[in-house]
Image (cartoon, rainbow, N blue to C red):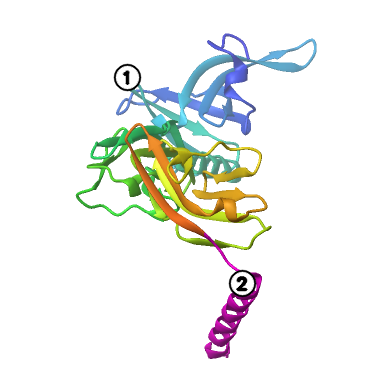
Amino acid sequence: MENYPGTLEALGEPIRQGHFIVWEGAPGARMPWKGHNRHVFLFRNHLVICKPRRDSRTDTFSYVFRNMMKLNSIDLNDQVEGDDRAFEVWHEREDSVRKYLLQARTVIIKNSWVKEICGIQQRLAQPVWCPPEFEEELADCTAELGETVKLACRVTGTPKPIVSWYKDGKPVEVDPHHILIEDPDGSCTLILDNLTGIDSGQYMCFAASAAGNASTLGKILVQVPPRFVNKVRATPFVEGEDAQITCTVEGAPYPQIRWYKDGALLTLGNRYRMVNEPRSGMLVLVIQAASKEDLGHYECELVNRLGSTRCGGELYMQSPALRAWDQHHREQLVAAVEERRPSPP
């Protein structure tokens, strides 16, 4: 294609092409009596009109660019009075409107072109769907009790996504403590006011539309003083066996842990070993091969920068016979509970 003011690759492959007699003029003006031989190309977004030029020596044609119209800026009239092989194209430009009358060789060819152009125009008129995408994602944050925290992100997509918030997999309910804000530009904000310890967790902003879905995650860690969820209690042991003193704790930052016996700090190692599971908060002080010398009052101390707390209990000796009886009694209780449970239907 000669004299085309651009790169032909940008047009893509032609969907259809063919020979027409073409008249061009201003709307309302009388069309010239004689039309021009033109070769018309239909691309995915454009209609291009060219002048065919024949090389008599090789009996081949080349095409000289004449005009181009965007398909979303033309109107089509497939009913031309007195000529069932022709259709009209009204092309709206920035400063004017031009009318083109295209006459095909047959009615079938004309109808095929009209159908193809109208189909492309309908597809172009439909909104282009884009799945949700988070251009700004949630960030982790740390705060203290009573503070206000904002979790912010921004999502785009067509159609406009519907946004939902979740904490640890459960929907976040809007209330005076949880405030949701959505802006037209896709910005989404979850405000948590007057933080408490239960606000710690993983938050998710989930965006969904007919085009797809996306999500972003952010963690909130509310710093709280340490506390005992399950306290240290009086613990029996059998001489010669390992004794285990247990408790469950929590705190953020996770607390430092110290154990005391009768007020004296215990040095871990040798016979004293501590099992610490920060994820569950489970603490176990293990005294290997416990003996009468280990009898006494044991305390666990928790310390972080927000405070400290202590809890303790007695370690007392239990005879093997009493321990066996206690174990048997517990097994009987469990069996009795199981018998009372109704059988599944």
Is 78 on the left or on the right of 241, as rendered? Answer: left
Is 47 on the left or on the right of 58, as rendered? Answer: left
Is 220 on the left or on the right of 9, as rendered? Answer: left
- Give the residue at x 35% y 31%: 305
The crowding category of the residue bearing disc 1, from other C-alpha atoms within 10 Å (few below 14, some 14 to 19, many at least 20), is: few
Residue 26 magenta-highlighted: no
The residue lying furthest to the right in this view is 58
* Helix, strand or loop for disc 1: loop
Q: Quadrant of residue 20?
A: top right
* Helix, strand or loop for disc 2: helix
Quadrant of the image containing the N terminus? top right
Q: Which region is colored magenta?
A: 316-345
Q: Nearer the viewer, residue 3 or 179?
A: 179
In the figure, 259 relative to 137: above or below? below
- Residue picked out by circle 1: 94
Q: Can residue 83 be seen by looking at this rendering?
A: no
In the figure, 321 relative to 273: above or below? below
Q: Quadrant of residue 203?
A: top left
Q: Mark 2 vs mark 1: which is more N-terminal? A: 1
Say which amino acid is labelled 2: Arg
Of the two numbered discs 2 and 1 in the rendering, the one whose residue sits closer to the viewer: 2
Q: Can residue 58 be seen by looking at this rendering?
A: yes
- Residue picked out by circle 2: 323
Q: Nearer the viewer, residue 61 or 177?
A: 177
Residue 78, how many percent across, how many down? 45, 43
Residue 297, how many percent across, how many down? 45, 52
Q: Nearer the viewer, residue 171 or 288?
A: 288
Residue 339 magenta-highlighted: yes
